[in-house]
Image: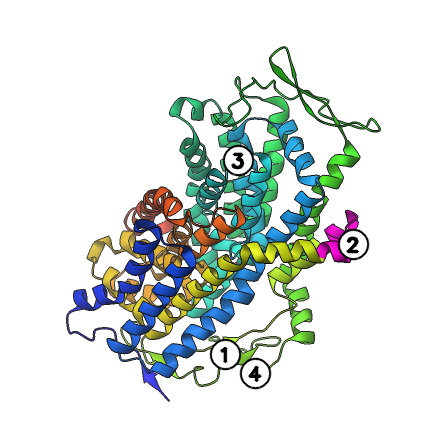
Amino acid sequence: MQWTQIYDPFGHWWLSTLVAALPIIILFGLLAGLKVKPHWCAIAGASTAVAVAIIFFKMPPTLAALSFGYGVAFGVLKIAWIVLAAVYLYDISVETGQFEIMKESVAGITADRRLQVLLVAFCFGAFIEGAAGFGAPVAIAGAFMIGLGFKPFHAAALNLIANTAPVAWGAIGTPVHTLAAVTALPESDLNAMIGRILPFTAVIVPFWLVRTMVSWKETFEVFPAIVVVGVSFALTQFFWSNYVDSNLVDIMGGVVSIIATLIFLRFWKPKKIWRFDYDDQAPVLPPPTVAITDDIGGEWAAEKFDGFIKARTYTAAQVLKAWMPFAILSLFVLLWGLPSIKLAMNQATTPAFRVVLPNGKVRPGPAGWDVPYLHNAISRATPVVTKPTPEAARYDFNWLSATGTGCFFAAIVSGLLLGQGPLQLMKIFWRTLVRMRLAMVAISFMLGLGYVTRYSGLDAVLGLAFTRTGWLYPFFGTFLGWLGVALTGSDTSANALFGSLQRITSQQLGIDPVLMCAANSAGGVMGKMVDAQSITIATAATEQVGNEGIIFRFVAWHSVALCSIVGVIVLLYAYVFRSAVPHGLLFVK
């Protein structure tokens, strides 16, 4: 069975666009407007997508069903498994009492909530994004912040906003690799261009993050720390993307910003410690310099003394032990992301067949399975592509090299080192699985919706509407990337969906294709906080399933506003700073 996508079944582009948007309208309408539980929203959105694809866009029912099943299978292994494993590690840390020590050790660095959110949500989250991506930062950092004492709503919303600037290089640079593959443009040029757009937002987002929490006055009270966090990350991001490679941009940015901030906080403290109104009402003294000591048997406990909170101390060994699960997690996630290790695991465990990449080279290593009756059965057509192009449908059953498996092994190793036996670990995992079951259903159906949208061509119909904006296309083309991530939950998927369309449209309008393809990825990162998959992950990790609509309404305008800033930056590159668009750039080896 062969089928070519149809982009204007009604003969009026605006009507076809409206109908193509129905699944998204239903999904977010139920989620944000009617406060329906997320798994029902996902089921309703996916069902609408299948119905629209079959009835109005003439997609064969078999292909629609297979597309949905393919998306669900992808969601279970690639996304839901990461979230489940990350929350499992968090539950082990809580069960063993280590999270309490972690929480207070961070308070030993700073008790100020503004600085804690910079360190955990932005810096640590960027590191996890670079190593794992695909929802892991929101799940892990969100759970971490709850352990610090943040309310679940704040933990979820602030992590969604923070997980923006690093997303273009998530999972060891996967979005950039994908963008280069689908556009046939030099990866070094695309990587450098993204690295000339997003560093501006890397400076803005930490300030935005703190301002979301507190007033202008209270934001400027920690302005020096915000500058250190944002500038250190932005400079590293720019340097690594322009002069090294696309693999370790976020990892290095996260590490450098954490180190720079910790060093800075050794010499600078805010005049006032800011806390939420739901924190302990007693005034909190700045942490003493001996908050962590080597004294044997040192302990921490909150005691009131003359109206203040008095802190006892931990031994260095206790603090290291408490942080051990997340140190092990970072190590496993980093190792699982290294191409050589991933390839070795795939060669041992994943079915293989020959795959030829767009550049004519054979894809190294195993490439998974062709999805029966779906692989290459659907073709994209002009004007989305220059000539009819079959859509591949390959499922990499990389159960061992999947990031979620790395997170799971990290949890098991951590639990054993913390004195938990196999039976205890099984009981904790069962409790985690029961608590996360509906979230996993929601995530899987969200991916099913995204894949039906992709294979039916509904995404292309929505994207083509953005190409009718003329000289303002650099601004609205940025929102095309935003739309792609909002639909799929992944910057990688958004680049795969719209990368080719960006190149074709920009060339027709006389705009540099390197700029617009990079803008697709750079704009896409701001859609990360509103995609239903990320919101579901955030609520699942922070134990507030059912509040998805509230969180969506809270972050929506932040998402649009930040993407607008990226759009303005792209406009300036398109018409004012054209010479700053890289061409023929080579990485330093």
Q: Are marks 4 and 1 in contact (CB under 8 Å)?
A: no
Q: Residue at label 3?
A: 150
| Mark-to-mark CA distance, 3 and 1 | 51 Å
- Residue at position x 17%, y 66% in the image: 15
Q: Nearer the viewer's eye, disc 1 or disc 2?
A: 2
| Mark-to-mark CA distance, 1 and 2 | 51 Å
Residue 360 numbered tag: 1
Residue 374 position by quadrant:
bottom left
Q: Is residue 248 visible?
A: no
Which comes sooner in the sequence, label 1 or label 2?
1
Q: How many marks?
A: 4
**In the image, what residue type sits under mark 1?**
Gly
| Horizontal arrangement in the rendering, residue 131 relative to residue 186 (left or right) | right
**In the image, what residue type sits under mark 2?**
Gly
Which comes sooner in the sequence, label 4 or label 2?
4
Q: Are marks 4 and 3 in contact (CB under 8 Å)?
A: no
| Mark-to-mark CA distance, 4 and 2 | 43 Å
Residue 429 position by quadrant:
bottom right
